[in-house]
Image (spheres, rainbow, N blue to C red):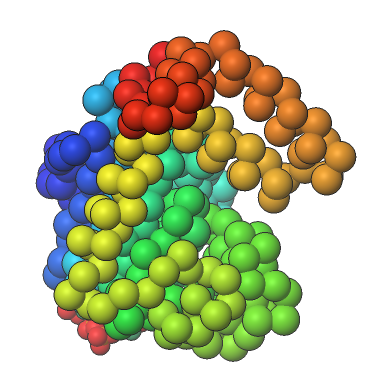
Amino acid sequence: MNNNILTKIEDHIGVATLNRPKVLNALSSELMDELIEALESFDRDREVRVIVITGSEKAFAAGADIGDMAEASFLDMYEKNNLARWLKIKNVRKPIIAAVSGFCLGGGCELAMICDMIVASESAKFGQPEINLGIIPGAGGTQRLTRAIGKYRAMEVILAGKFLSAHEAFEAGLVTRVVSKERFYAEAMILAREIAKRPPIAVQIGKDAVSKALELSLNDGLEYERRVFYSLFATQDQKEGMKAFAEKRPAKFEGR
Ligand code: HXC
């Protein structure tokens, strides 16, 4: 472990902080290994109900580490297939909130977009500037950005290297909420605490069902939703939630 990622657990929230400040949290291969290990460990830990990924006030992450890639050949990239491991982040079942300030570029923007919600500081800058390096996004940028903001704005970001300010990103539907640069982490934690109070299995199944909306046809998605909806009636949290409502008291959810 090289401390490229700092982790802590607080109030049922697992926090992973990107920690390469000298290079604006460029996503080296080692950093990605550590991040995935941290996220998978949070996902296994019953104590953790929500995950927050953050960086510094100056940068969430300025992209993949360009130094790692500059001399690579097609064969190096193809054989290492480093980007395939990003699927492990997509497969995390607990909700992930990106708390973003400053530069959120290239692989950094793709990392934020794999998350389920993005709380952005007003100083955040989102972009996919890979085109300036002779490449295109490779960890979901062309797909997730297009789904989030539509083809015509995504083309400008990806082909012309346009950065989106936090407010532009919010208007375009890329960001959950914009807050002051002093408050981005605190507000992400407040949102995380709100979710952590909710029944954990229903939260995870809700994340799964919303995510399916981007992958399935409407009919398949509706059927999927119905099935997972019925399955929640097998949980104690459903019994507790409805009983607490009838008894006019707060529910006590235990993730069972
Ligand atoms: C490696 C990086 C880096 C990166 C910044 N640094 N971004 N190192 N990889 N992606 C380093 C700089 O070399 C510099 O190191 C230090 O961080 C501070 O950066 P500066 O450029 O001096 O800061 P500033 O002038 O404020 O400009 C900030 C910036 C610029 C606009 C964000 O750094 C920039 O354009 N970075 C590259 C952004 C980018 O192209 N991202 C896409 C990468 S490709 P020294 O040692 O000089 O102080 C990608 C592919 C994704 O992400 C594929 C899937 C993962």
Does residue 240 lie above or below 87 as drawn? above
Quick one: quadrant of the C terminus? top left
Rendering quarter of residue 50: top left
Rendering quarter of residue 171: bottom right
Kindly identify the residue that appears in the image at 28 percent across and 31 percent down: 48
Name the quarter showing ligand 1: bottom left
Q: Residue 203, position in %: x, y? A: 47, 35
Does residue 54 lie above or below 12 as drawn? below
Q: Give whichever of 225, 16 is nearer the camera.
A: 225
Q: Residue 51, position in %: x, y? A: 32, 42
Rendering quarter of residue 197: top left
Q: Residue 224, position in %: x, y? A: 74, 30
Taking the image as shown, residue 150 lies to the left or right of residue 256, namely: right
Q: Give whichever of 104, 120 is nearer the camera.
A: 120
Q: Residue 107, position in %: x, y? A: 43, 62
Taking the image as shown, residue 211 lies to the left or right of residue 193, namely: right
Kindly identify the residue that appears in the image at 49 percent across and 76 percent down: 170
